[in-house]
Image: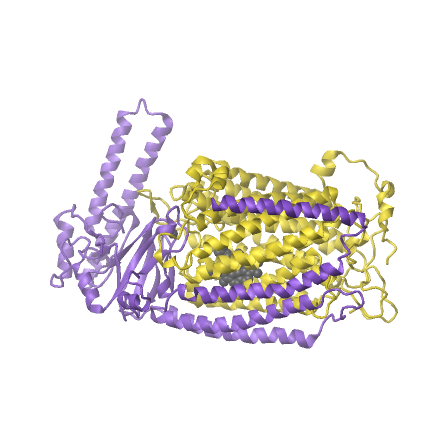
């Protein structure tokens, strides 16, 4: 309705302008006035508007800033976020000075030197001194900005110190999953071919390989059976599709068989060397649709995607990293404010830190989010202890011996139901 | 004035008959024309039509952003029940509209339209050539552009809708129809259209380069070229060097989509199935895309800056300040624009050190940009400014260039970019610095050279109304987007209602849509003025703006070969405005230097 009204007003306004311009054109022709001879009146009017415009422009700018400054992001809740906020302040100060200076000159000159018949412009084709000045001054300022910027960038992006706890963020259309290491403190290897309903992240364990192989075999057999039974009446394109599908499943199976060999060799080799294989870390991993971090501790986030590019964006933490299928990207950050404190700071009891997707990824891109809970170390540990291991069924109690549990699940039953911890509703 | 100048009366009669030896059919004159003047008009009118398509799209998605989930008869009128049941925009269609809007504006309006129109019109005229080096290739260039436009528009009508992965079409989203319906036939048409578009662009670009290098008239040294030509020239070189890379990127994407290759795809599980692709990298596409993509933003901007240089100098009745520095900065920008592409990829997981290199090169670009801004301002200082609509748009360009260039400095600083990458802050930045600046440059060019194109004048009063409404609305629309971005709001979101954290700033979306509707409607004034003036505008005189460049020494009437007699000879640079000791405040390039006169 409002739009209709707006449209009606606009149409009427336009029609009025067009009528007026017609009338103006006709009278102008009658008076022998030529378009290219801009009248003194027009020059003066436009010059005045050039002086008026900055009042709108700067005024709008200042109004927006005053009115919205408290509605932008609240204080940074991570250590490097604080560096960035300071860096923003300093850069803004420089840029605002340049903004007001250049715009003031631009509009002041435009409004002041409008055409008058009795004078000529000042013939001033160049001045090397001035030109040098406004090459050198911006250069110096920019060099400063670059040095400052790169210093901060380097501090943010230096690799996390070894031993920093790792947490995985996994994006897919259109939600996030987190993965925490179990008692062994390490995240297990993954392979996208192992993904199924019980193993949304494709974690590699002997059990998940066995399950997946069986699933695929069943699928292949079902396909083969259908092909044999319906061979005579399937339309050719459908038959072709089915054959393609079976071939595809065979390829996937053979890759998984390769993976199994690799895994077995690695486990054996590592065992001989008295080490643990990356394939034995997976079973106790905690796969969860909730995202918790301890305050005051540096955490490395490993970011992956199942399907297309997403971006893990944590605006309150001033952190962002793309999730790219086929590779793992990393960033580390140290939260400095808990969710509870932030609720006090923002005077908003419903406040949550949010992880959102910031790379176009499809229809529901606009709603791919997960709350981040930052809490004191103790609460964090307690929360983690309640989560079930991925294939270790029971809660991850610190008592159980890590290597043991992996082995038992591996051999015990291939249908071990994997645990994906669903978020509790608070 | 030189002997070649014609009084306007002379050409209104049949003076041209002597010089015209062959009769032209309607088809060879208006359709398959090989004349640069006609081709330029064809580009312009196609671009205006495409621009309207893109503007209507933007109004549709702005309505959705301002009042998410509400139905609008406007939306329903254009999209029907399939994409807008009850007038409520479908989320996939939202992304499709954003994608096609961006594609049309960047490539079809501001690349094809802007360069195609003004390089074609002005290069032969201003360097003193009878036509482009190859009129035939020039004609092909237009028709390829036309075909590309038709393909792009036709993609709007296919089953799954048009391409929807954003104008940057990053795979895997753009490669997999399972990921978004627009990545089916719509995306194939997008790629086909762009391939044809690139062919058009290359044919045009080669022609421009060759013409500028080889067909300059006697006396037209490179250092006497108007800055328009310098800008078009460097733009054409950028296009010729970078568009092929986009073409390769598009071809590889096409192979991934059709033949099952894995250039950009690896380890993807989608639609309940593990795909066969392994070993590719989606990031590779981004490198290839932005290797064109960043030069592309200057392909869009430089012609607008060239036009502005010419218009500001002519209408300030004052030489452009620092002519050589202006050329130097065009060249520096052109060169640097090839080594900064990584600034679009700071958070793709690229090596942080590589990121640092791109920070450095990107921030260097701000230096020649600053030089240009200061030189424009100094040109206005103590000028004698005639406020034609073209001049207003040129001053507008300087303002938007400043505002957008400054936010570029934030984005180029990788550490700061972590926070605002892919948010509305970026949308604000590039619409102001690229969208508005380039479109203002295009408007300036149209108002300024309309008499040269159509032999008639556009209406100034409508031009003034058009400028001031557009100028206010441009800031009204794009300035508040900075704040939405600084609140952390991502771009390419169908709605912000799912996030209470944006509640504080979403009311800005209503304000923006309001300005967008007014600003969009103001373009009706322009369109009316443009088409009305083609037939009914006041007849033009030969040199209406009392300008120095060569195009104004040719008769108003369009002749094959541009000048009825010999091509004029050039004796001086194009910016002798208000030179002391001269009888008039302009001295055309064809005027010989007086004894002992210094060139500048
Ligand atoms: C001082 C000069 C400039 C600097 C330092 C600069 C820097 C940047 C940076 C770093 C980005 C990437 C931001 C991000 O995605 O997070 C960006 C985006 C962009 N810039 Fe600029 N820029 C400058 C001028 C320009 C100009 C002159 C144009 C066009 C004429 C332009 C057009 C664009 C476009 C189109 C994008 C967005 C691309 C997209 O993601 O869709 N910029 N700019
Ligand atoms: Cu997304
Ligand atoms: Cu760029």
Q: Residue at x 64, y 52 (%)?
A: B466
Residue shown at 60%/75% (left/top)?
Answer: A136
Foreground residue, A346 or B18? A346
Q: Position of residue B190 (x, y in %)?
A: 51, 43
Residue A389 versus residue B210: which sits nearer the camera? A389
Q: Is residue A68 visible?
A: yes
- Nearest the viewer among B181 and B224 is B181
* Quarter of image, res A223: top left
State the residue at coordinates (68%, 70%): B378
- The yellow-coloured chain is labelled B
Report the quarter where the N terminus of chain B lies.
Answer: bottom right
State which quadrant residue B196 falls in.
top right
Q: Would residue B106 be seen by someone viewing this image from the given angle?
A: no
Residue A176, given in percent of the width and then of the height, sits at 31, 53
| Letter of the purple chain | A
In the rendered image, residue A78, in percent from the top left (x then y), is placed at: 33, 69
């Amino acid at each position: 309705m409002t739009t209709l009204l707006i449209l009606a007003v606009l149409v009427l306004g336009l029609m009025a302008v067009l009528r007026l311009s017609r009338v103006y054109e006709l009278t102008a022709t009658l008076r022998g006035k030529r378009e290219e001879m801009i009248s003194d009146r027009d020059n003066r009017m436009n010059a005045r508007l050039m002086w008026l415009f900055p009042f709108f422009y700067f005024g709008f700018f200042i109004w927006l800033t005053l009115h919205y400054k408290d509605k932008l992001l609240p204080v940074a809740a991570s250590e490097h976020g604080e560096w960035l906020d300071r860096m923003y302040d300093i850069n803004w100060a420089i840029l605002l000075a340049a903004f007001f200076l250049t715009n003031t000159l631009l509009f002041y000159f435009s409004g002041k030197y409008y055409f008058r018949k009795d004078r000529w412009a000042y013939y001033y084709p160049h001045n090397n001194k001035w030109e040098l000045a406004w090459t050198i001054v911006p250069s110096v300022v920019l060099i400063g900005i670059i040095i400052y910027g790169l210093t901060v960038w380097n501090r943010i992006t230096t690799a996390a110190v070894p031993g920093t706890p790792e947490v995985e963020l996994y994006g897919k259309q259109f939600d996030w999953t987190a993965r925490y290491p179990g008692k062994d403190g390490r995240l297990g290897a993954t392979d996208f071919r192992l993904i199924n309903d019980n193993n949304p992240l494709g974690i590699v364990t002997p059990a998940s390989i066995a399950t997946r192989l069986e699933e695929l075999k069943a699928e292949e057999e079902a396909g083969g059976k259908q092909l044999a039974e319906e061979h005579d009446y399937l339309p050719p394109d459908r038959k072709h599709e089915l054959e393609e599908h079976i071939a595809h499943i065979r390829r996937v199976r053979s890759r998984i068989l390769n993976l199994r060999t690799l895994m077995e060799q690695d486990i054996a080799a590592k065992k001989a060397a008295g080490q643990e294989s990356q394939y034995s870390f997976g079973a106790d991993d905690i796969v969860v649709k909730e995202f918790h971090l301890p305050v005051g501790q540096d955490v490395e986030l490993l970011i992956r995607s199942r399907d297309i590019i997403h971006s893990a964006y944590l605006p309150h933490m001033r952190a962002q990293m793309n999730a790219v299928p086929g590779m793992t990207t990393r960033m580390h950050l140290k939260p400095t404010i808990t969710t509870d404190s932030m609720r006090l700071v923002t005077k908003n009891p419903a406040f949550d830190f949010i992880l959102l997707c910031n790379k176009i990824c499809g229809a529901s891109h606009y709603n791919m989010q997960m709350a981040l809970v930052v809490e004191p170390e103790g609460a964090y540990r307690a929360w983690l202890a309640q989560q079930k291991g991925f294939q270790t069924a029971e809660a991850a109690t610190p008592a159980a011996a890590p290597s043991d549990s992996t082995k038992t699940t591996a051999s015990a039953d291939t249908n071990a139901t994997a645990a994906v911890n669903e978020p509790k509703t608070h | 004035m030189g002997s070649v100048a014609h009084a306007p009366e002379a050409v209104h009669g049949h003076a041209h008959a002597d010089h015209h030896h062959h009769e032209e059919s309607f088809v060879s004159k208006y359709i398959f024309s090989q004349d640069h003047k006609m081709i330029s008009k064809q580009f312009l009118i196609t671009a205006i039509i495409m621009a309207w398509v893109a503007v209507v799209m933007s109004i549709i998605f702005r309505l959705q952003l301002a009042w998410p989930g509400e139905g609008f008869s406007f939306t329903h009128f254009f999209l029907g029940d399939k994409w807008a049941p009850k007038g409520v925009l479908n989320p996939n269609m939202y992304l499709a509209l954003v994608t096609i809007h961006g594609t049309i504006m960047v490539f079809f309006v501001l690349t094809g339209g802007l360069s195609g129109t003004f390089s074609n019109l002005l290069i032969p005229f201003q360097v003193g050539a009878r036509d482009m080096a190859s009129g035939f290739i020039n004609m092909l260039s237009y028709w390829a552009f036309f075909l590309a436009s038709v393909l792009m528009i036709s993609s709007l009508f296919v089953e799954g809708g048009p391409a929807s992965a954003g104008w940057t079409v990053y795979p895997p989203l753009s490669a997999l129809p399972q990921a978004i319906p627009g990545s089916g036939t719509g995306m194939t048409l997008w790629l086909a259209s762009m391939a044809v578009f690139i062919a058009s662009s290359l044919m045009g670009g080669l022609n421009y380069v060759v013409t500028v290098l080889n067909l300059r008239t006697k006396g037209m040294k490179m250092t006497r070229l108007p800055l328009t030509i310098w800008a078009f020239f460097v733009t054409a070189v950028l296009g010729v060097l970078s568009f092929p890379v986009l073409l390769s990127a598009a071809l590889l994407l096409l192979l991934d989509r059709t033949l099952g290759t894995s250039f950009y795809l690896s380890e993807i599980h989608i639609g309940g199935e593990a795909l066969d692709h392994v070993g590719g990298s989606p990031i590779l596409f981004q490198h290839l895309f932005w290797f064109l993509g960043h030069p592309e933003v200057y392909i869009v901007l430089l012609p607008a800056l060239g036009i502005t240089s010419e218009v500001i100098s002519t209408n300030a009745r004052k030489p452009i300040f620092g002519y050589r520095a202006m050329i130097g900065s065009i060249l520096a920008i052109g060169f640097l624009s090839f080594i900064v592409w990584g600034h679009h990829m700071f958070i793709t997981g690229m090596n942080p050190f590589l990121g640092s290199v791109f920070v450095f090169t990107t921030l260097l670009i701000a230096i020649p940009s600053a030089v240009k801004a200061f030189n424009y301002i100094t040109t206005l200082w103590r000028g004698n400014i005639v406020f034609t609509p073209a001049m207003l748009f040129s001053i507008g360009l300087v303002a938007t260039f400043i505002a957008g260039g400054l936010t570029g400095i934030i984005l180029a600083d990788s550490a700061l970019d972590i926070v605002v990458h892919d948010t509305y802050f970026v949308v604000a930045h590039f619409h102001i610095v690229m969208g508005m600046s380039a479109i203002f440059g295009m408007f300036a060019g149209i108002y300024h050279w309309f008499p040269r194109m159509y032999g008639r004048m556009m209406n100034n009063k409508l031009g003034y109304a058009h400028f001031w409404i557009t100028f206010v609305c441009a800031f009204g629309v794009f300035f508040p987007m900075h704040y939405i971005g600084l609140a952390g709001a991502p771009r390419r979101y169908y709605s912000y209602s799912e996030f209470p954290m944006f509640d504080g700033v979403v009311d800005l979306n209503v304000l923006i849509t309001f300005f967008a509707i007014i600003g969009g409607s103001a373009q009706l004034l322009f369109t009316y003025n443009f088409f009305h003036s083609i037939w009914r505008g006041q007849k033009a005189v030969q040199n209406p703006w009392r300008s120095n460049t060569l195009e104004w020494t040719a008769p108003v009437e369009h002749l094959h070969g541009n000048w009825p007699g010999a091509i004029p000879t050039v004796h001086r640079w194009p910016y002798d405005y208000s030179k002391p000791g001269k009888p008039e405040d302009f001295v055309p390039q064809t005027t010989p230097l007086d004894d002992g006169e210094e060139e500048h």
